Image: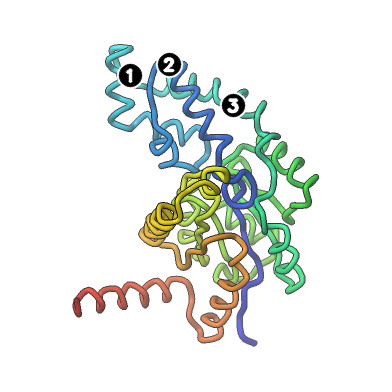
Amino acid sequence: MSEKIEAVIFDWAGTTVDYGCLAPMNVFVEIFKEREIVITSEEVRGPMGMNKWDHIYELCQLHSVKTQWRAKYDKYPGEEDIDGLYLRFEPILLSNLRSFAKPIEGIIDVVDKLRKQGIKIGSTSGYTKEMLDIVAEEAAEHGYKPDIRITSETVGKGRPFPYMCYENAIQLDINGMQKMIKVGDTVSDIQEGIHAGMWSVGVILGSSLHGFSEREINYMNQTDLFMSMEAARTKFYQAGAHFVINSIKELPESIERINDLLQQGIYPHEYTKRREMEQWETSIIQ
């Protein structure tokens, strides 16, 4: 029997809920501002998708942050400083999460369609279990409820490590990581799926990588919107995404394409090699 996709593993903020991944971004900016350190939204979005302590650690390694920190505190930020930032981050985010748990337009219909095809719905997140419980409860009130949700506490390490995806495979009873798709809105989502041996799909609209709220998208000049989407698409592909879709509504079409590849005996790593070869041949011709 030909193989086909049996499960889709979704990210949460920026992919299925919280258009633009605004909840964590705003808090990251706030906690650094409290320390009189200026950090841009673009800088904050760089490590998005990682667990939040690791995210703060990565931000503290930025040259701009280290320079400001040394000028202000006569030293570079250390582990105790990261712990202190995280201790501020967690309660602020927990108090705001419920307001940023509305499902992104199209996700409920997509999940219904996938379930009718017998596809199981898993999830991973950069949130802690406590954070995700709040988001999941509110999202369920609006009609979005995956079969399972896994955080890094369950497996010991978060993204870009593949362990949350492995746990999804175990709990969903999927025999073969090539039968699963990871769908996300950040570079770390893509890396998580690739490291797990899964198909990785990036979503542009609503994503942290794209970096715009729904309101900003609605008022954006169409040329600017196109250019920003193409820039996000390029970043996803550079991160190793197998496919990049404009919106979550296009996912069923990507699954059809992936099923066609599986029926030809082409697995994720083979598809990546084939695409790299095609790009190399194109560059030679040019």
Disc 2 versus disc 3: distance between alpha carbons?
16 Å
Labels 2 and 1 touching (C-beta < 8 A): yes
> Residue, x 63% and y 51% (percent of image)?
16
Using the image, determine if residue 183 lies above or below residue 83.
below
* Residue assigned mark 2: 35
Return the disc, 2 or 1, that comes first in the chain's sequence.
2
* Residue assigned mark 3: 90
Q: Amino acid at mark 3?
A: Glu
Q: Amino acid at mark 2?
A: Arg
Disc 3 versus disc 1: distance between alpha carbons?
21 Å
* Residue 160 visible within the image: no
183 on left or right of 80: right
Instruction: In this rendered view, identify the residue nearer to me: 51 or 232.
Output: 232
Circle on res. 223? none
Residue 98: image quadrant is top right
State the image coordinates of residue 171 (x, y, percent, origin top left). Answer: 70, 58
Disc 2 versus disc 1: distance between alpha carbons?
9 Å
Return the disc, 3 or 1, that comes first in the chain's sequence.
1
Using the image, determine if residue 279 lies above or below residue 67.
below
Residue 172: image quadrant is bottom right
Q: Residues within 10 Å of mark 1 (few under 14, many from 20)?
A: many
* Residue assigned mark 1: 69
Q: Amino acid at mark 1?
A: Trp
Using the image, determine if residue 141 lies above or below residue 34.
below
